[in-house]
Amino acid sequence: MATIQAHPLTPQILLGLTALLVLLFDSIRPNTRRDGVLAAISAVGSIAAGGVAAWFIAEGTGQAETGGAISEFGGSLVVDGTSLFFSVIFASVTALVVLGSYDYVREEDHGGAYYSLVMLAATGMSLMAVADSLAVGFVALELASLPSYALVAFLKKNRGSVEAGTKYFLVGALSSAVMAYGISLVYAATGSLRFAAVADALAGVESVGVLGLGVLMVAGGLAFKTASVPFHFWAPEAYEGAPAPVSGFLSSASKAAGFVLAFRAFTAAFPLETAIDLGINWALLFAVLAVVTMTLGNFAAATQENVKRMLAYSSIGHAGYVLIGLAALDGGGELVLGASMMHLLVYGFMNTGAFLFVALVEYWDVGRTFEDYNGLATEAPMACVAMTIFLFSLAGLPVGAGFLSKYVLFMGAVGAGYSWLALIAAVNSALSLFYYSRVVKAMWFEDPSGDFGIERRPVGIYAALMVAAAVTVALLVAFNPVAETAISAAGGLLG
Amino acid sequence: MVGAVEALLAVTALSAVLVMLAPNRVAGKLAFGLSLLPLAGSLLMYEGFDGSGNALLESGTLAFETNETWIQLGDIYALNWHVGLDGISMPLVVLTTILTSAAILSAWTPIDERQSQFYGLMLFMEASLLGVFVALDFFLWFVFWEFVLVPMYVIIGVWGGPRRRYAAIKFFVYTNIASLVMFIGFAALVFALPVTSFDLPLIAQSLRAGELGSLAGIGPETLKGLAFLALFAGFAVKVPLVPVHTWLPDAHVEAPTPASVMLAGVMLKMGTYALLRFNFTMLPDVAAEHAELIAIFAVVSVIYGAMLALAQSDLKRIVAYSSISSMGYVILGLVAYTTYGLGGATFQMISHGFISGLMFMCVGVIYNTAHTRMVGDLSGVADRMPVTAAVFVAAAFGYMGLPLMSGFAAEFFVFLGAFHSTVLGSAPLFTAAAMFGIVIVAGYLLYAMQRSLFGPFFTAEDYEITPAAAHDVVPLVVLLLAVIALGTAPELFYDQIQGAVVNLAENGGGEAAGHAAALLGGGA
């Protein structure tokens, strides 16, 4: 029976086409605003891309049972379980963000630019998931980053937003330069840019110092994208200044994009065993980074007075947890790497949801500090229930799937012989409950200090919040498919 | 097919959702009506209970068991939906459903805002508490264990007394850190075992068979010791044992009465239940090795808790501190490792659940109308509230361990078991010291009652004191009847309990010959 053979890169193509379609539609009549249509195109495009990716996963495209990873464009792109899994993450987060942006962006100028930039960034991210060479990875990373800079500075009459965008751009440019230089060093040492070819050449490398420096610099560039120490300091500024939906987009999708490239680059191009033989133990590097990142993120988050900034630091903390996936690779691997992927997926929903709640509060002009949130539950109980689910799930309480992904991650680390790392992560996670519960306490326990003056209930943000909350809870029960896919994807990466 | 346990959990959770969506006006009545469903369900399950032996041991057969794969993590680990009941968990399930219905009734008077949220949370709490007692997979159990905290945290924080926010956060942080320590300890243990799931029976059997390997260079013996310590520390907070008890009085004093009932009545039992299931079932040799040390903790809790209660002038604080004392008996019974010790400890959990719930409700009923709980501000309350005062006195007698009350049977079993312990060095000495606690309990309860309930009528606050409403009195009477029933016929639960602990005890077979009722002189 003849079946329709979809191109394995369909999700990426769909996202890119959607971006172009938004631009095209916006340029037909540039002086009228039709945000509804633009948001709808973007949402449909991203949902379609995510749907196709999910369908591919179900069909087994690019996975071991149907003949393994599919290589495209002369081996510079690859479609496998990992790339599809992450495409689903990017597409879902993008859909949520687009939905949640509608009411928020409608009051600003240049709606067309906003949606097309979001879609272009999403395209870049999904390309990072399929990149199979350092060069393509770098280009994809830039495609994801450049629209992000503009998005952060999107509120151009707001000094905070512009300042944040500038800072983000400067740090981004610096880390891109570092990464490009690192790539050139790796090329100098191995004579190749394709991950597989780099790995082949690795064993015979003579100039180990050059290679080591290159690996270090590549790791640095990826640390920027994932908001990990030492390139994390842009994150609180950028997330705080950016429009809240964009903060959600960057802290969930962009972080996941950095991680998928890191996962693939380090497992495919610099296999750990060979690297350790050469004296380049990058797992140790990531272990140190993981500890520093999670501890710094959590402690800084605990001292914040501004909710958005608190979420920004907590997002750094979560990057630290996910880094465990790379740090603990030498002792088992697929479970702990898979757990990192699971956590990124769940994080995509719960963290985007939390930022969308902040977007809702900003939309109402309620204020930004914990005190401003006092008694919000009396006015908006449904939204506050959703926010409570996100926060407790982020903290690792079993009201959402964040609990499962976190504990699978810690268990994976223990199983891989990194009990100390799991211990530090678990202590950090317990600490995080303190600052997340401050928001819950403000919303539910405190009395409102005055009238919030809430007039409208923006349908788009509400819908996005409810979907994100429903998925966060539903995944707690129906976690098995996610766990299976992530572990088999991780297995595919590790070969 | 959906088993009885699943139905019980689902009905309770759905009731919670329904109540949350209901208007405030009817929420209390609706919640009470719906809470009768799990109550009836648990009684039916008690009737149809066909388990035997201990759930975690190979020899045990479970009642209402389901075991399905929930999440498969590669080929390495599976998380299972494994639930079932044995003679230890069945009575606790019944306790939970009875106390929840009673607590909901007792909330009708004091809770006057955001009712639908309050009653919804109470039912959510019931569902998660039931989950804790039925779960037999560590992960599943841990999900419920953690989930219990959320509704309690919100209830204390929203409906509590003046310092509710401080108490709620302290409760939340304290017990969460404890959970974490316990989780790490247990995870370390599991990873050093040749098992591929978190199934508690499999883990227990594997541990008892001595299959523990090393983890991260730590040998089996050290690992066992560390894990025991982590688990013990984690559960001790929940129990609570001195010196990690300080969250309890704060939480109790600030919590609204129905939450106190659940907290003292059921949530403290989570700690002792877990100690029995984990520390004393899975690592009996470590427990035996450190028996004296644990017994010291137990006796110190008994005596020190009672002394603290003696020093209080707030009726609710008195009852709260006396819980610490009573939980000390449970630990003493556990560490004795005799059939009567373990069985008595479990029986004491049930007995204390009913009695402390009852005492908190009495204090709550008095507070509802007098608006004060200070012993010095009240006098002669029995004059105006004769029924409440009578129940209070009866409950206090139960606490002191007077015959015909469940407290007598429970403490009798514990002391009998502890006295004959072969595991515990100088067992008679420990037993004697713990028995002295009863004297102090009698002292402070009688003294408090004498001042507040009897004597000439007087209150410091100028409120009219009226007899309690019928819906306040009914749960008091029902719980008192339960206490008396268990006191006169302990075999109602004790037979099931003994069946589940007899194989755990070090000298199980011989001494178990004597039957509970026979020992108590034909039920009197």
Image (tube, coloured by chain):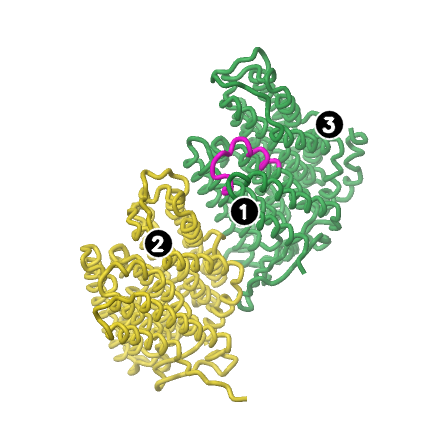
Taking B247 as reference, is A125 above or below it?
A: below
Q: Which percent across, then down, holds residue B472?
A: 60, 29
Question: What is the CA distance from the residue labelled 3 to the residue labelled 1?
Answer: 36 Å
Q: Secondary structure at mark 3?
A: loop
Q: Are marks 3 and 1 on the same chain?
A: yes
Q: Return the mark for residue B231.
A: 1
Question: What is the CA distance from the residue labelled 3 to the residue labelled 2?
Answer: 57 Å
Mark 3 burial class by Cα count in 10 Å: few <14, some 14-19, many 20+: many
Q: Return the mark for residue A78.
A: none
Q: What colour has chain B?
A: green
Closer to the eye: label 2 or 1: 2
Taking A494 as reference, is B304 above or below it?
A: above
Q: Which residue is mark 3?
A: B404
**Which residue is painted at 29% across and 79% down in the image?**
A206
**Which residue is painted at 64% across and 46% down in the image?**
B38
Residue type at mark 2: give it: Ser
